[in-house]
Amino acid sequence: MRTRVAALCALALIVTGVQAQTVKNFLAAVTQKWTAPFEPFHLIGNIYYVGTDGIAAYIIKTSQGLILMDTALEQSTGLIKGNIAKLGDIKYILNTHAHFDHTGGFAEIKKETGAQLVAGERDKPLLEGGYYPGDESNKDLSFPPVKVDRTVREGDKVTLGDTTLIAHSTPGHTPGCTSWEMTVKDGSQDRDVLFFCSGTVALNRLVGHPTYPGIVDDYRSTFAKVKAMKPDVLLGPHPEVYGMQEKRAQMKDGRRTHSSSRASLRPMWPASNRTSTNSSPGKPLRFTRPISGDVPQV
Ligand SMILES: [Zn+2]
Ligand SMILES: [Zn+2]
């Protein structure tokens, strides 16, 4: 019996070692892209992309200040801040999910702006502990803990000035994974925008010792729920979720519609604040409506 226990312990150590190595390898493979700068740009309506080359973050400009949706890795916080014209105007920080690659800048930006952090109810312990669910002691996946000022559940609303976002609970990727919906004006049209949290497995465990109890059921319910969602504009926590880079390139060379007459759509940050200079400053941009509701569009 003792031998068997010892063998199991040894196996557990090996498995843990393998997992730790896998995480390190994974991070080594993605960190360069995740931390590379990307020129901030106007997406649609009052939404702006302020993330990195591999991690999305957004600014929503309202009549009473800014809403920041997510940040990136902790070491990219200076870059994210540089992408935002007036940091002090941030009134709310919204979170899609409490993973280290989207939450690394929360503590610093919250401290500097006094903004209120709003997140899914079940992600609150993760944010306030600064850890990956089910892997609490893994420093590679940790981030600066941050106080959550308000938690949301399905259907809860966050309003600032003329803008309201609706929370949709889409758990699985994290227990409190929250997708946010809002409407933007696109010329004379209203467009329904969805900031989808995520539906990938990521570093989660679904079998054996699951990342958290009920994770498989959560994924199943989320898959069923999002099938019925047909937003005009789909955004996500990583740019590749919606082919951002390709669409942005199309915008730049004119293969996507530009709107040139509406002052309200002008980029909010001066060219001097941008992280790169190969831009076309002052040129307002918008994306066209998707041809099919099933095709994700920025
Ligand atoms: Zn994630
Ligand atoms: Zn991520």
Image (cartoon, rainbow, N blue to C red):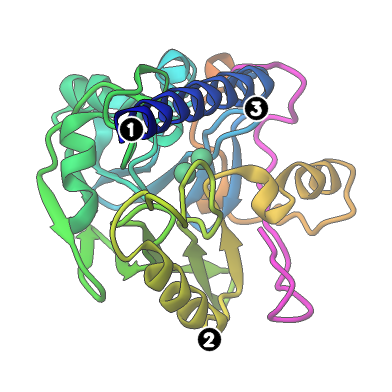
User: In this orientation, which residue lies closer to the viewer: 92 or 148?
Assistant: 148
Is label 3 in a helix, a strand or a loop?
loop
Q: Magenta residues: mostly which secondary structure?
A: loop
Where residue 288 sits, quadrant-wise, is bottom right
Nearer mark to the viewer, of 2 and 1: 1
Where residue 188 sits: x, y (%)? Answer: 57, 77
Residue at point 56% right, 55% down? 200
Nearer mark to the viewer, of 2 and 3: 2
Q: Does the magenta portion include 241?
A: no
Q: Is residue 188 above or below residue 162?
A: below
Where residue 196 sits: x, y (%)? Answer: 49, 61
Q: Which residue is mark 1?
A: 5
**Whether residue 120 can be seen here:** no
Q: Which residues are magenta?
A: 275-298
User: In this orientation, which residue lies closer to the viewer: 290 or 296?
Assistant: 296
Q: Are marks 2 and 1 in contact (CB under 8 Å)?
A: no
Q: Is residue 234 above or below residue 225?
A: above
Q: Which residue is mark 3?
A: 39
User: In this orientation, which residue lies closer to the viewer: 36 or 100?
Assistant: 100
How far is the residue under mark 2 from the one under mark 3?
A: 33 Å
Q: Is residue 238 above or below residue 289?
A: above
User: In this orientation, which residue lies closer to the viewer: 41 or 131?
Assistant: 131
Precedes in sequence: disc 3 or disc 1: 1
Residue at point 51% right, 67% down? 193
Q: Does the magenta portion include 283?
A: yes
Precedes in sequence: disc 2 or disc 3: 3
Tell me which amino acid carries mark 2.
Answer: Ala
Tell me which amino acid carries mark 3.
Answer: Glu
Q: Which residue is mark 2?
A: 228
